[in-house]
Amino acid sequence: MLDLIAKVFGRESPSAEIAKERLRLVLVHDRSSVTPQFLERLKEDLIRVISEYMDIDTETMDVRLSQTEQHAALVASIPVRRVKRVAP
Amino acid sequence: MGQVIVITSGKGGVGKTTTTANLGAGLASHGHRVCLVDADIGLRNLDLLLGLENRIVYDLVDVANGYCKYKKALIKSKQFDNLFLLPAAQTKDKTAVRPDQMRDLCEELKQEFDYVLVDSPAGIEQGFQNAVAGAEKAIIVTTPEMAALRDADRVVGLLEAMDKERPMLIINRYRPGMVRKGDMLAIDDMLEILAIDLLGVVPEDEQIVVTTNRGEPAVLDKHSRAGEAYRNITRRLMGEQVPLMNLDDDDGILSRIKRVFGFGAR
């Protein structure tokens, strides 16, 4: 009863809620089986392919896997310096 | 032809061995022929929970390596003529057996038994790989703690990658009083997080300590609440639809009466 009153007066949130939220976050990380090495290889391949069509800034490009509970997305930000002229 | 079910968890100390002993005794009490395999080589304990520690001659390593026939190594339980234990070796380690040997052994055992329950060691290394090798189904045991749930999730992922049947979850050492106070994860929260099917919930029960001391599975103790939970889980495993037991009266008659009269009893 005492701790109920304490909760009513906003002492602290129930610890189960904290655990649930922390667990949710840590599992999102755990479940993504993507290693930095994997991302690095993907990045190199992307550079190779895209460079045939465009002149890109490989220094500032950013490739990462963005993951929420519902879906994962590969997010790539690749600055383009110049589009090459390719035969149609 | 029987079925092989592995009992696993990732984290240690959540109740794998207790679960194995109780479900084994539960299934045997319904007349099924049951073999329990202790795959925790080097740290054998299932024999203790069944009160069979003084009867071991041959073990899993002897059988898997072909030193003796499995029938020679099996130990009949004290309570049932149709419940047997294949004990783990105590002086070897997990590398003493290979997954392909376990697969062959399980294949052989399920010709003879209705249920083969394999008690997995903690961890996800070779001991775990051995334990799951011959199983078509998996029961994952967890407690309502973050570390146990995280490890359970890891094991779910590994089993998925091995194309096993969808694992079933047992939540052990559940304390409804703490859940009411908001200080323990609730059943639905855990199911939502792990996204697997629930096989049962076992309430925290001091009686488990007593039955373990005696080497008698709690499932046979009519007064044990954990025993009641294991009896229900046994029937669900046999395909029956059994509702979850009333978990709420864990804190005694008095607080139940208080709750009815609106005294909170928190």
Image (cartoon, rainbow, N blue to C red):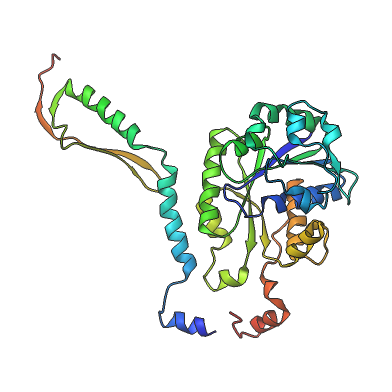
- Is B74 in front, or is B113? B74
Task: Classify the position of the C terminus of chain B by image quarter.
Answer: bottom right
Left or right placement of residue B76 versus residue B195 in this view: right
Left or right placement of residue B9 versus residue B214 in this view: left
Instruction: From the top left corner, tell me how far across and down residue A75 is, in percent.
Output: 27, 39
- Is B236 in front, or is B253? B253
Task: Classify the position of the N terminus of chain B by image quarter.
Answer: top right
Residue most extreme to the top: A87
* Residue under the point 82% across and 32% down: B70
* Residue under the point 71% across and 63% down: B245
Instruction: From the top left corner, tell me how far across and down residue A57 is, in percent.
Output: 13, 32
Instruction: From the top left corner, tell me how far across and down residue B110 is, in percent.
Output: 78, 32
Q: Give above or below for B260 relative to B214.
A: below
Residue most extreme to the right: B81
Q: Can residue A75 be seen in this view?
A: yes
Q: Give above or below for B249 relative to B138.
A: below
Q: Is residue B240 visible?
A: no
Left or right placement of residue B106 versus residue B112 in this view: left
Q: How many labels does the image show?
A: 0
- Is A27 in front, or is B11? B11
Left or right placement of residue B148 versus residue B258 in this view: left
Residue most extreme to the front: B91
Residue A82 picture quarter = top left
Instruction: From the top left corner, tell me how far across and down residue B119 is, in percent.
Output: 69, 44
Residue A52 picture quarter = top left
* Residue under the point 85% across and 33% down: B71
